[in-house]
Image (cartoon, coloured by chain):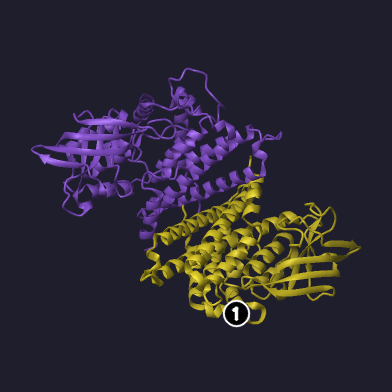
Chain colours: A yellow, B purple
């Protein structure tokens, strides 16, 4: 048993932490969000140069191994900085889905470009009626000889407007929630019939509603076997889920630290508010929540890297997301409450961490969804 | 990073499992599974089996007859015992007074007391809390006044667990009331047969008197029973508390309890033709508590991993105590929810070994409410969970 990071992981952690400490303060972040595309292209090139974009991928795919523990090392630090660059959307969701479904030269070339920071991806999966059920897909893909026609509408497509390729989840056959019949197509965002309605998200990122009206793509742009893409999509989303949980752990620890620091300086009734036991115990509980979230995210990452059966891994991911969601609500809301009015203004960073962790709770299934998924996987 | 045991540790785990399977008495196992309370004789019998194996004192150093186990071995042992349902060693002698005697006692005291603790020949109890000294333990008022070669002790202690079985009591007593309250306390060992000691059982909400009030009326205690220096008792007691951290989270016991809850949920009817284990709201609650237990388990493992590389123990035990006890209480709450009408009978005597009449209520759920009531103690004793939060605020958050 050893819960310490390897030497390489520790170096990675130090490197990412140095970057976020030196180059990613609250003001810088604001400028990045206001800038073109809502992320910094210089930062993205730097991430590529430092090898961070290679972390999610196996050595065969040109990456650094693709371990979940490596990934959470990075994500936790990104969480501390509330970093808005589309790492999850492009490198983890897009890159890993491409890596697991695609084959041959096309895959090699695209991954090379992605790892080099020259390519942005976006996965168009969620639909308005689907909630968190990845199999609930109405967007249709009808094939005629070797041409596919896509029709439908996707919501909350992270990083869509910045993407060079959309990975579109569509149904080739079967009923609305059938596991079978789901494929992924590589679609040019500029193709005829694709309409991207780009918008800012609550947490300072970019996403879009993407509509497909008789969009024609070549059948060669179907990634993997026809109708069999769901398991790959599920496992990529599971990895991204653990990654955002780790990001939340970093963000929650910042919220705790900022709240404790503030309570030591903010004076009311002639004393620092941190001297009040009514607040002290709530901060102690925030600390406990942070620790429990950290523990369960480590657990999930280790399970993903293990040789356990798929059901065990899925249950571990759901446990992590369910429990992290509880921590998000408690630590996030308490951080705001203890800060008081200043934290519900745009001018303090605390509210922006709160927005990010709230978005994380909403994404990839909220706590209740994952508690139920966990229960359904169990031997209950 | 990994949460795996080494090959040697896995072999040890097998050895412990095999030992429990072959050596733990079947009649005790049957009683435990039926929620029948174990008395002194049964607990001592089990402890002596461990003694014969050389496993009586997992946390003691070898020189005093301990196992010399690593932190991980201790963890494995406690886990296996907990999963099996075997009783933990009664802590008062083994885990509470013995480390203080080892650290601060004289050679004569070590020779006199430690072997009998190890062999479970002598049963100890704790004399800390008083009616007006609970969380504020240092406010204790029981006095010990030096008179020749003796101390004369007057006052009363409370929440004294299993004092009715005890041969000796270790007490915190006031030897100086003119100084700061922490600086006038001494650590005294007292023979329970001393004239002037009387016990009054305290019946708890489960109808059982597992605790007592202890009264001292001019009890003469030889001064040689003082541990260390006069007025240093508070320091000794505190050192003991910071070292008392093994198995505080109760993960294995909660796992066992959760397993029993799931089995019971599968058996119990939802009143609509199905079983409670299929009711979505109840299923979700069970899932959430299992997830909480997983988070607790990995927090404990993280603490253990840090201890194993000799990192100084931090305030982790406070987290483990708070989360572990609150989780255990939540499990009791779910049992109560599951039991519905089955929780109403109050027949505590049917959980005593000598009960001969027809039992009342459902086999598996009849003790549900009694356990729920009794376990309210978990978040109160051992430094209440509010005191633990104070510790976190002070030691970690710097508040």
Residue at the limit of the structure toward the top, as seen here: B356
Q: Secondary structure at mark 1?
A: helix
**Is residue A312 toward the left or the right of residue B359 in the image?**
right
Which chain letter matches label 1? A
The residue closer to the viewer here, B334 or A60, is B334
| Image position, residue A169 (x, y; %) | 77, 62
* Snapshot quadrant of residue B66: top left
Give the answer, above or below, for where A142 lies relative to B370: below
The residue closer to the viewer here, B96 or B149, is B149
| Image position, residue A221 (x, y; %) | 80, 66
Visible in this render: residue B338?
Answer: yes
Disc 1 crowd, CA 10 A, few/some/many (<14, 14-19, 20+): many
Q: Which residue is at a point 36% across and 24% down the rendered structure image?
A: B41
**Is residue A30 toward the left or the right of residue B137 in the image?**
right
Residue with the mark numbered 1? A32
Residue at the limit of the structure toward the left, as seen here: B148
* Snapshot quadrant of residue B24: top left
Visible in this render: residue A309?
Answer: no
**Is residue B55 toward the left or the right of residue A375 in the image?**
left
Total number of numbered discs in the rendering: 1
The residue closer to the viewer here, A291 or B69, is A291
Give the answer, above or below, for where B223 lies relative to A160: above
Residue at the limit of the structure toward the right, as seen here: A145
| Image position, residue A9 (x, y; %) | 50, 63
Q: Which residue is at a point 34% across and 30% down the rendered structure image?
A: B51
Give the quarter of the figure containing the C terminus of chain A: top right
| Image position, residue B281 (x, y; %) | 64, 45
* Snapshot quadrant of residue A364: bottom right
């Amino acid at each position: 048993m050893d819960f310490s990071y390897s030497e390489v992981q520790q170096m990675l952690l130090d490197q990412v932490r140095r970057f976020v400490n030196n180059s990613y303060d609250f003001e810088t972040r604001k400028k990045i969000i206001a800038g073109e595309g809502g992320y910094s292209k210089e930062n993205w090139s730097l991430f590529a140069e430092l090898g961070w974009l290679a972390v999610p991928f196996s050595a065969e795919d040109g990456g650094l191994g693709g371990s979940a523990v490596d990934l959470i090392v990075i994500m936790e630090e990104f969480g501390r900085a509330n970093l808005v660059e589309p790492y999850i959307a492009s490198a983890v969701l897009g890159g890993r889905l491409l890596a697991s479904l695609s084959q041959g030269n096309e895959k090699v070339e695209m991954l090379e470009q992605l790892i080099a920071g020259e390519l942005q991806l976006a996965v168009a999966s969620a639909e308005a009626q689907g909630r968190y059920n990845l199999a609930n897909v109405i967007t249709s893909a009808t094939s005629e000889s070797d041409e596919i026609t896509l029709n439908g509408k996707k919501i909350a497509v992270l990083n869509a407007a910045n993407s060079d390729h959309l990975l579109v989840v569509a149904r080739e056959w079967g009923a609305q929630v059938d596991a079978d019949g789901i494929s992924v197509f590589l679609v040019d965002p500029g193709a005829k019939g694709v309409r991207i309605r780009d918008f800012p998200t609550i947490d300072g990122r970019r996403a879009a509603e993407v509509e497909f009206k008789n969009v024609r793509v070549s059948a060669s742009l179907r990634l993997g076997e026809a109708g069999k893409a769901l398991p790959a999509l599920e496992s990529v989303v599971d990895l991204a889920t653990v990654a955002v949980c780790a990001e939340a752990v970093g963000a929650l620890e910042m919220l705790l630290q900022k709240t404790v620091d503030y309570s030591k300086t903010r004076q009311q009734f002639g004393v620092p508010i941190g001297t009040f036991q009514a607040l002290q115990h709530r901060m102690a509980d925030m600390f406990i929540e942070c620790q429990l979230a950290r523990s369960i995210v480590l657990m999930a990452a280790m399970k993903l890297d293990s040789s356990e059966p798929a059901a065990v891994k899925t249950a571990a991911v759901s446990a992590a997301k369910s429990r992290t969601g509880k921590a998000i609500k408690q630590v996030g809301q308490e951080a705001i409450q203890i800060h008081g009015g200043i934290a519900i203004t745009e001018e303090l960073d605390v509210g922006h961490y709160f927005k990010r962790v709230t978005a994380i709770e909403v994404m990839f299934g909220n706590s209740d969804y994952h508690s139920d998924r966990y229960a359904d996987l169990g031997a209950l | 990073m990994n949460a795996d045991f080494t090959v040697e540790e896995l072999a040890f785990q097998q050895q412990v499992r095999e030992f429990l399977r072959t050596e733990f008495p079947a009649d005790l196992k049957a009683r435990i599974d039926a929620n029948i309370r174990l008395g002194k004789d049964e607990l001592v019998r089990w402890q002596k089996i461990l003694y014969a194996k050389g496993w009586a004192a997992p946390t003691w150093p070898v020189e005093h007859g301990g196992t010399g186990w690593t932190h991980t071995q201790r963890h494995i042992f406690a886990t296996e015992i907990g999963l099996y349902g075997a009783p933990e060693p009664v802590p008062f002698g083994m885990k509470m007074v013995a480390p203080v005697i080892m650290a601060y006692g004289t050679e004569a005291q070590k020779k006199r007391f430690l072997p009998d603790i190890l062999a479970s020949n002598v049963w100890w109890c704790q004399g800390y809390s008083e009616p007006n000294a609970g969380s504020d333990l240092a406010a204790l008022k029981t006095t010990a006044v030096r008179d020749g070669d003796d101390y004369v002790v007057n006052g009363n202690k409370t929440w004294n667990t299993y004092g009715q079985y005890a041969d000796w009591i270790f007490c915190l007593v006031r030897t100086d009331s003119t100084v700061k309250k922490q600086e006038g306390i001494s650590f005294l060992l007292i023979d329970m047969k001393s004239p002037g000691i009387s016990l009054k059982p305290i019946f708890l909400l489960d109808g059982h008197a597992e605790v007592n009030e202890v009264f001292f009326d001019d009890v003469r205690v030889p001064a040689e029973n003082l541990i260390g220096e006069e007025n240093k008792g508070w320091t000794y007691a505190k050192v003991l508390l910071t070292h008392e951290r093994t198995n505080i989270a109760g993960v294995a016991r909660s796992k066992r309890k959760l397993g029993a809850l799931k089995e019971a949920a599968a058996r119990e009817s939802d009143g609509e033709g199905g079983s409670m284990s299929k009711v979505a709201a109840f299923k979700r609650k069970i899932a959430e508590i299992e997830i909480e237990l997983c988070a607790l388990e990995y927090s404990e493992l993280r603490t253990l991993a840090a201890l194993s590389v000799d990192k100084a123990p931090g305030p982790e035990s406070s987290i483990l105590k708070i989360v572990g006890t609150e989780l255990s209480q939540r499990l009791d709450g779910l049992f109560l929810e599951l039991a519905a009408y089955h929780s109403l009978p109050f027949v505590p005597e049917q959980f005593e070994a000598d009960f001969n009449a027809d039992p009342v209520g459902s086999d598996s759920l009849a003790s549900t409410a009694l356990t729920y009531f009794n376990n309210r103690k978990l978040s109160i004793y051992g430094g209440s969970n509010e005191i633990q939060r104070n510790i976190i605020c002070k030691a970690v958050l710097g508040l």
